Amino acid sequence: MRYLISLALLLAVLWLAISGVYKPIILILGAGSVVLVVWLSRRMDVVGIEHNPALYSWRLPLYWGWLVWQIVLANLQIARRILSPDMGLEQRVLRVPLKHRSDVARVTYAQSITLTPGTVTLRMEGDELEVHALTPEAREGLESGEMSRKVKWLEGDR
């Protein structure tokens, strides 16, 4: 029940923030939309511990900020290598351990790798990812495990 309540609250706040119109008819339509979505989510059985909308609530914006910064840094590294042909690319496919509990965290980690320029997640199999890295910096970033630690923090692990 708390998952449905957190979903309803999240949707209501999102509706109010995005609409910007607080006339009674709009508020009634918004409330009706929230109730409909919560009811459909319950009926489809897509709300639960694994899909709790409040699970990552305050951590998610912090993670997004960190990820955007990593994307900017990776873009600069790739641009530097492209603009300096003598540096070249040193492509490799490597296996990265996947140490996350939930499927959501595992997919978040794989997608975060893919979003970062210079790396692409090729396959998720068992407890490891197969990743293509264009540069030594990208490889070192994956081997250091910093992104994995950030996703574990996002997941609630210390």
Image (cartoon, grey):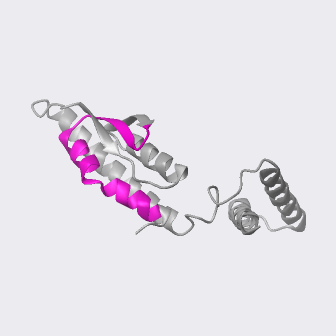
Residue 100, quarter of picture: bottom left
Report whether 4 appears left or right of 115: right
Q: Position of residue 13 (x, y in %)?
A: 70, 67
Horizontal side of 130 relative to 136 (left or right) equals right
Residue 65 in view in this figure: no
Q: Position of residue 9 (x, y in %)?
A: 73, 68
* Residue visible at 21% across and 47% down in the picture: 140
Q: In front: 79, or 131? A: 131
Q: Nearer the viewer, residue 84 or 122?
A: 122
Quadrant in the picture for the N terminus: bottom right
Q: Is residue 132 magenta?
A: yes
Q: Decide which of 53, 84 is in the foreground and name it.
A: 53
SS majority, magenta? helix
Q: Is residue 64 above or below residue 158?
A: above
Residue range corresponding to the magenta coloring: 125-154
In the rendered view, tell whether residue 72 sits above or below residue 16. Answer: above
